[in-house]
Amino acid sequence: MRTLSTRTAGFTDSVIRRMTRVSMEYDAVNLSQGFPDFDPPKALLDSLAHVAYAGPHQYAVTWGAFNFCQALAQKQSVPMGHTIDPLTEVVVTCGSTEAMMAAMMTVCDPGDKVIVFSPFYENYGADTILSGAEPIYVPLAPPNFTFDPNVLEDAFRQGVKALVLCNPSNPTGKVFTRAELTVIADLAKRYDAYVITDEVYEHIVYAPHTHTYIASLPGMWERTISCSSLSKTYSITGWRLGYLIGPAAVVDVARKVHDFLTVGAPAPLMEAAVTGLTFGQAFYDELLATYTQKRALFLTGLDSLGIPHTTPDGAYYVLLDVSEFGYGSDLDFCYALARDVGVGAVPGSSFFREPENRYIRLHFAKTEETLNAALDRLSRMRAILGRKG
Ligand code: GLN
């Protein structure tokens, strides 16, 4: 048989999503792939029930149903510091995953260089490979996961086309400060690069931290493609509703990429989700209060186990340092954890460019009951997996 594409030759499946399948196989409490096990807001479910009979059930406009784009533009205009035109500056996509791929394919030719901070959400690696771009990794060094501005500038000097910014960051929980974003923005302007964001955790930012959209910084609207989704904010990861927002000239091309990749996001789900986009501030306050509580419960539980871990400023991921267990491979550790302890985790190595083997990632977007069950199982982790000899 003829060979398959060279572009996919080095591909593995997503380890994050694989760990969900592994968790299912071993009936483990799945804290690997980040998604909630609780229901979306009732108002959204009511809309969905209504849409089941009222429709639409056929294709929406390829770039996104107008009422969805309008509600989104209204929600995002003030925080993004730009009056967003729903007709020309929005594309509704199948999750932020498609938004980022479309953004990357819009901006990059094969061989173009793209800055990716490490650790990073694993899709960015695949995005660069599929679009033919060459990633240049800039480390976010533990424990604070800050970057060295000189290292970042060295990367920009290599003639990069774009920088990928995950803020709040998966898996570190870092929330980039306005000062850090200003450093990135100034470099992007100086070296004439685009910024492609992933801001899916924009509403999960713990006090006293606050979320700043890099698109809102002076001179950044023109060169930022802001990607996000409704998945995490409204607990509807399975609805696959994401979007990108950017200047009309860029969005015009992104629309064509999107048109041929997926045609469009699911029309009935877009219709039902408009209800969520028009929620008032109280909804976002409550969402944050819920996650603040879950974070406290989970981190307190981890503290009492005495396993060193990160404290996220945003999003819902925690990196645990499991070096004391002495495993040569964090992937093996995660398989053993799922099988023998009954908790699903993601090996840290799937996020790091550097040869890193110390961490596993857990998340706390789960009910208290699920989190307590996981903590209970984790309390036996040392007895079961403890360093032998
Ligand atoms: N962002 C989620 C995670 O890191 C996964 C999202 C997805 O699988 N599409 O676990």
Image (cartoon, rainbow, N blue to C red):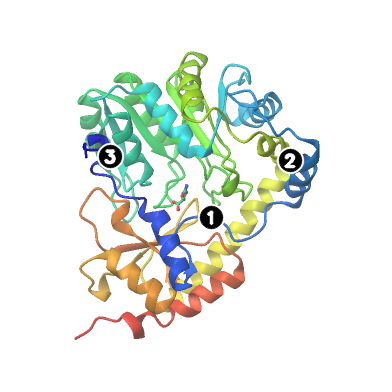
* Kind of residue at badge 3: Thr
* Kind of residue at badge 2: Gly
Give percent across and percent down for residue 330: 28, 65
Q: In which quarter of the image is residue 387?
A: bottom left
Q: Name the residue under label 3.
A: 8
Determine which of the numbered discs, if any, sits on residue 280 in the image: 2
Q: Residue furthest front?
A: 1
- Disc 1 on helix, strand or loop? loop
Report crowding for label 1: few under 14, some 14 to 19, many 20 or more residues within 10 A (C-alpha).
some
**Residue, x 33% and y 46% (percent of image)?**
146
- Horizontal placement of 113 versus 200: left or right? left
Give percent across and percent down for residue 122: 35, 46
- Horizontal placement of 240 versus 267: left or right? left
- The answer for how far apart the CA atoms under marks 1 and 3 are is 27 Å
Q: Mark 1 points at which residue?
A: 35
Of residues 105 and 58, the one drawn nearer to the viewer in this rendering? 58
Of residues 167 and 145, the one drawn nearer to the viewer in this rendering? 167
- Disc 3 on helix, strand or loop? helix
The answer to whether the residue bearing label 1 lies less than 8 angstroms from the nearest atom of ligand 1 is: yes
Q: In the rendered view of the protein, which quadrant contains the C terminus? A: bottom left
